[in-house]
Image (cartoon, helix red, strand yellow):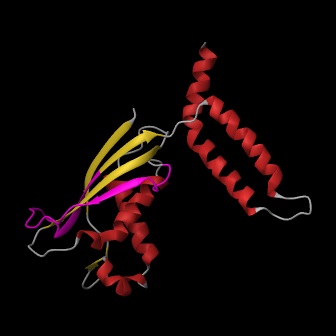
Amino acid sequence: MGERKLNFIFVPPSFGIKNPQMVTLNNVPKWWKFAKTKLKDEFKAQLSDWSLPPVDDDNPYTKADIEYTILRKNGVKIDSDNLAFPYKWLQDLLVENGYLVDDDQTRVVLNPTLLHVEGNVETSVRVEIHLKEKYIMTIDELKATIETLQEDLLKVDTVDGEHMKTASGRVRKALGEIKNAVPELRRALVERDKQ
């Protein structure tokens, strides 16, 4: 239950209708104005629909190791870091879909491009994701978090009515931690009820 591995291959997003071009770091100026948000949303939808299996547990992971390998049908090399945008969008999608709490604890490995790979698509990317360490909060940790949350809520607005951004930031962080821990806390409370 502590780890999960995902493996799949994706086709990098492209832009343009007559002569589609792959979204790479080399052609950012060309596609940036060509609806970056549209490209990103379409790519995420494709991954969600075809590549990412459903989340098997509602308790997200805290860490991930992700390996990317570009697969080229022809012999033309492409630098492995050239697809940084799709890599980042995939990592964001892992958070959005509930696989990860956040992608700030993600270790990324960019393997050298493999040339002359058989297949129907000129360029694809093999992804290997190793999710580690479930987000867990004990009932005692919840109690401590709630006590701190109450103190910070009192500090959000001072006596003279000024808003305290630092206290507000701590409150938002605590709420996020509680949200991520809810599935595990529910299970712990059910177990306590059975005793």
Identify which residue is drawn at 8% across, 62% down: 118
Please name whichever residue, 55 or 27, is drawn nearer the observer in this view of the structure: 27
Percent coordinates x, y for residue 179 in the rendering: 61, 44
Q: Residue at x 59, y 37 (%)?
A: 182
User: In this figure, what is the number of numbered marks?
Assistant: 0
In the rendered image, which quarter is residue 27 located in?
bottom left
- What secondary structure predominates along the stretch shown in magenta? loop
Q: Position of residue 172 (x, y in %)?
A: 67, 53
Determine if residue 15 is in view.
Answer: no
Residue 48 in the image, given as x and y percentages of width and height: 38, 55
State whether residue 26 is above or below residue 127: below
Measuring 44% from the left and 53% from the top, which residue is drawn there? 105
Of 173 and 96, which appears nearest the observer? 173
Q: Residue at x 61, y 19 (%)?
A: 192
Position above or below: 170 against 78? above
What is the quadrant of residue 160 in the picture? bottom right
Residue 114 horizontal side relative to residue 88, left or right: left
Expressed as whole percent of the image width and height from the top left, the position of residue 17 reads 30, 82
What range is drawn magenta here?
A: 101-128
Quadrant containing the C terminus is top right
Magenta stretch encompasses residue 110:
yes
